[in-house]
Image (cartoon, helix red, strand yellow):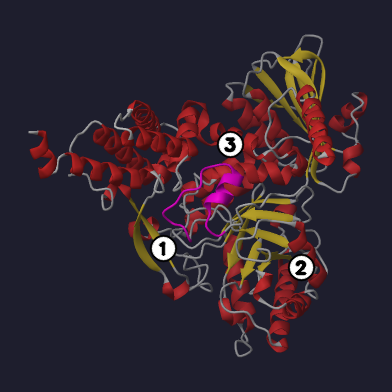
Amino acid sequence: MKRIITTLVSLMAAFSAFAVTSPYNIYPVPQKQVPAEGTAGFTAEVEIIPESGIDRATINRAVEIMERLGLTAVESGKPSGKRSCIMLGINGSRERTDRLASKLKLDRTLFNYQKFDRHILSLTSDKHGNATVVILAENTDAAFCGLASLEQMLDNGFTSMQCVTIYDWADIQNRGVIEGYYGVPYSAEVTKDLFRFMARYKLNTYMYGAKSDPYHSRFWSEPYPESITDEQMRIGYLSQDMLKQITEVAHACKVNFVWAIHPGRAFTNPEDKTVNERIMNKFENMYNLGVRQFGVFVDDVGVPYDAPTQKLGADRLTDLQNRIDAKWNVDGASPADTVKPLHYVPQLYAYAWASPENARIFFESLSVTPSKINIYITGRAVWSVPNNEDLSTVKDYLGREASWWWNYPCNDNDVTKLFPMDMYTNFRDETHIDNLARLEDGLTTNTLIINPMQQGEVSKIALFSLGDYAWNNAAFDCQRSWEASIPAVAGKKYAAALRYLAPYLRYYDSDALSYAVNQYKKSFERGNPKPESLIARMEKILESCKELDAMASSSNQSDRLLHDDMKPWLAKLETLAQTTIDLLEGKDVSSVDLENDSKFQFEVLRGMGAGIVMQVRSAEPCAEILCPFIEWLKQQQKKTFSPSNTESNK
C-alpha cells in the first residue's frame, strides 16, 4: 500500500509539473516545454530563413504550414526586422540560426543525449511583438519534426502566442507503419494521405509489404505494370506512375518509404543461384520509381532449422546489403541518391515457435550479417505487445537490438471488426492480443512499426497513439492520447460525432449500452418497460451517423477516405439503431435484413502469392449486445402478438 501511495503522489506531482510547464497541447507529447515571458504574433508575411544544412523538403514544409494558415511565406537569407520569421538551422553549424541560439542562451544539453530527431524550438517576440521562431536541430529531418510542433502551436491562433522554448527528441528512432496485413492493399490515395498524417505527428517510417500485392510476392522479380485496369485498382494493384507519386509524397513528408520484396523460399534455395541478381534488378526498378530503402521478407514460408539453410540466408542477406552499398552508397553520392540499410523479416519472427535452443541458433546465424540491417520480430508470439523481456531475449541471441513489427491494430484475423478505441481497449477487443498487456517505459528497440487494419484511415487512430508513445515513452497516457487522436483524424468538424460513435463501431458494445439494455430488460420483466433511455441513445447514434455520412461529400479528401473506410459499419449501425427504436415502439421490422444487405458488405483478399482469393464479408458493429438484444425484442414482439395472446386479450 505504501508503494502504491508513493507512486500516486509521484504521478500527481509529475502531472502538475507537466500542466504548469506545457503552454501548448502538442502531439506527440514533447519532452519538455519551458514557458517564457510575453506573447508573439505572426505578420501577414513570414520570412523562412534556412541554413545551408536544411533541405528543400523541410523548407517546403515551412512554406506549406504558413500558406495553410493564409499567410505568405517569403524565403530569405536573413531577417529583415520588419516581419515574423522562422529560422531553421543545424546545431554546431556556426551559421545564422546556430549563432542566434547561442545569443538566446538555449540549452544544448539534449544534443548529447543518445536519442533521435533532437531539436529545440524557441518562440520569442521582437520589440514590435512579431514572432521569431528558431528551430535548431541535429539535422534537417529533426528540424522537420520541429515544424510539426510549430504547426500544432499555430492551429489555435497565431496573433497572440505564449512565448516558449521546447526541448524535444524521440525515444525510438524509426516510428510508423508496416503495411503487411493479409487483405486489400491501401490505395495510392490512402497511402499518400497517411504520409501527410505522419508528417504532422512525427512518424517517419512506412514499410510496404502488402501480402496481397502480387508484385511484392508472387511476381516479386517482375516490374510493376505501366498501367492497370479499374478492377485491378479496386483490389489494390499499383502502377509504376502510382508508385512514383507515392514516393514523391513520401519524400516531401520525410517518410522513409521502405519497399519490401518477398522472394519466399527462393531466398534460401541452394539451387537458385540467381536470386540475389533478380532481387537487385527489382530493387533497381523500384529505385528508378523513387524508392530509397528496401526490405526483404521471408516470413510465413516455413522456418529452416538446418545450419546450411540458415547460413545461406545470412550470406545472401549480407551479399544484398553489400551490393546495395556498392551500387548506391559510394563516396560522393548525394544524400538524396543513397539507400538506407535493409529491413529484414526472417522466417522465425515469433521466437516462441522454436525451442530456446533452436531460437538461439537461428538468430545467432543472423548475427554475422551487417549490424546496420534491421532484423524484425513480433515478440514471443505473433500478436505480442512490445516489451523489453522479448527484446532482451532476442538481443541476447542476435547480439544487437531487434526491430519490432507489431501486429496492431491488424484485423486480418478479425476482418469484420474495427478497432477504433484507445490502445488498451483495443487490446481487450482483439482476440489474439493479451488483454492485460501494457506498454513499458524505456522500450529498448530502434524501430516500432504497427501492422494496421485493412481500413487505413481508421487505423490513424492507433497510429496517432503509436507515434505518441514511440516519441515519448514516459509521458504516454493511453486515454488522453486517444482523446487527442479523434480530432487529429476526423478534424474538429466531425470529432464529436466520431468520439460518440467509436464505442459503437466496435464488435463489442460499449459498457454504457450494455448497462442500458440490461436496465430495460429488468423494467420489462417487472411489467413496466421503460424504453425512453434506450430510444434516446439510439437516436443519438442515428444523429452521429448522419453527421459522419456528410463526410462523403466533404471537400477534404481525408474526410472522404475516412468515410469510405467506415461506410459498411456506419450503415449497419444506423440500421441496428433504427431497428431497435422501431421494435421498442412496437413497429413491424420483418422486412429488415441485418445479415445480407449489400450496404453492410465489403471485400477482402485472403492468402498470399498464388493463393490469393477474394471474399465478401459483412461489417459487425455492436454485435455482442445490441444484435442479440434486437433478436430478444423480436421474440417479445412475437409473444405479444401470438394467437393465444391475441385471443386472451379479446
Residue 529 position in % (x across, y down): 31, 30
Residue 79 appearing in the image? no
Residue hosting label 3: 485
Q: Which mark is residue 605?
A: 1
Residue contact at pointers 1 and 3, CB within 8 angstroms: no
Residue 157 position in % (x across, y down): 63, 18
Distance CA(mark 2)–CA(mark 3): 33 Å
* Residue type, numbered disc 2: Val
Residue 606 appearing in the image? yes
Magenta residues, as a range? 413-432
Near-viewer residue (482 or 490) = 482
Q: Classify the position of the C terminus by image quarter.
A: top left
Please identify the dominant SS of the magenta region.
loop
Residue 24 position in % (x across, y down): 71, 25
Of callouts 1 and 3, the N-terminal one: 3
Q: Secondary structure at mark 1?
A: strand
Q: Classify the position of the N terminus by image quarter.
A: top right
Q: Which mark is residue 394?
A: 2
* Residue type, numbered disc 3: Ser
Q: Does residue 529 sit above or below 137 in this rendering?
A: above
Disc tally is: 3
Q: Does residue 395 sit above or below 274 in this rendering?
A: above
Extreme residue toward the bottom, this view:
271
